[in-house]
Amino acid sequence: MKQVVLTGIKPTGTPHLGNYFGVIRDAIKMSENEEFDNYYFIADYHALNSLKTKEDMKFYFKELACTWLACGLDPKKVVFYRQSRIAEDQELCWILMNVTPKGLMDRAHAYKACVDANKAMGKDEDDGVNMGLYNYPILMAADILLFNSKFVPVGQDQKQHVEMARDIAKYFNKKYGYTLVVPQEKIKESVATIEGLDGRKMSKSYGNQIPLFCEESKLKKLIMSIKTDSTLPTEPKSTDCTVFKFFKLFASEEKLAEMEKKFAEGISWADAKKELFETANQFLKPMRDKYNYYMENFDEVIKMLEEGEKVAKKVAKETILRVRKVIGVED
């Protein structure tokens, strides 16, 4: 049997360029590796801690599902599914809670960050902490262990969650005998950090993002608003600037060399941004067209997810039956 690689993303906002170049692009490339069975899921239950309304959940789920497909994910090559459609995930989560020490959850980065922030503000250390946040790593462990995942690609900031899933699998196997595959993190050492409009890391929290599939007119307006220095139009420009860094994301090596020459000779910021828009738009348009098609024909996307969920449910039922038997609730 092939080893399993599993990847999940929460639908908590409109995907932007930072999401694509930092995570989605590499994940799509990885999905084409036929040496592994690849599972790609939309972590909608994980998003409950961030989203406030059902309308947000529905909208961001739809955007994320269409984004995956527009960017090139092929449901025929991967198991593409919604976390919330796999009831066995929640069952395994509860079972794993009963072998997970509280001390392990106390060390979770997200929980500790909330506690530290509350202490700094003189609040009760658990102010605003719900059990969804506290038990988040156990649900993530269930996501991973349910599908016999061997490798989980993550950045350094998510490494702890996979380590915890590994610990939880070991706790379970020690108590009941080897039942769950013990996963390994697959660390992406060079996760791209994409600058936003103001030069800081692109993030919804900073309000400096460029939506991945915004209309051409909005894309142009946002690119023309990129923060620049006071260098005069005819003066040489540094390539260590946001405009040039964006250009590197979209341009071919030949175009990049041409732009580097123009920067050295003294191109105006307005002209540089205009060329950036034209290059970025040419790169994004084919994906944007596919995205708009899927958004308008979302029933096709649902059918793709449902096909993936049939496969996911089959594997999930096999795993949960194995778990039920070893804990003594199934003959």
Image: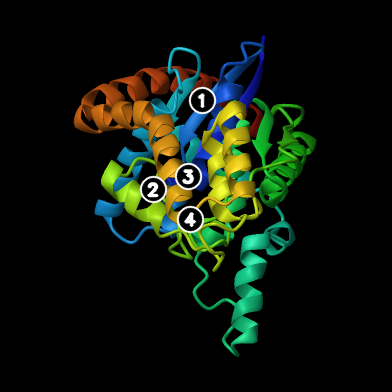
- Which residue appears at 44% of the width and 38% of the height? 280
Marks 3/2 in contact by CB < 8 Å: the verdict is yes
Element under disc 3: helix
User: Label 4: how many residues lie within 10 Å, few (<14), some (14-19) or many (20+)?
Assistant: many
Marks 3/4 in contact by CB < 8 Å: the verdict is no
Q: Which residue is mark 4?
A: 269
Q: Position of residue 225 (x, y in %)?
A: 40, 60
Q: Quadrant of residue 175?
A: top right
Residue 207 to residue 254: above or below: below
Disc assigned to residue 316 = 1
User: Label 1: how many residues lie within 10 Å, few (<14), some (14-19) or many (20+)?
Assistant: many
How far apart are labels 1 and 3 at the CA level?
33 Å
Q: Amino acid at mark 2?
A: Pro
- Disc on the earlier residue, 3 or 4: 3
Residue in the foreground of this view, choosing between 274 and 67: 274
**Considering the image in quadrants, where does the N terminus appear?**
top right
**Considering the image in quadrants, where does the C terminus appear?**
top right
User: Label 2: how many residues lie within 10 Å, few (<14), some (14-19) or many (20+)?
Assistant: some
Element under disc 2: loop
Disc assigned to residue 211 = 2
Left or right of 55 on screen, residue 326:
right
Q: Amino acid at mark 3?
A: Leu
Element under disc 4: helix
User: Label 3: how many residues lie within 10 Å, few (<14), some (14-19) or many (20+)?
Assistant: many
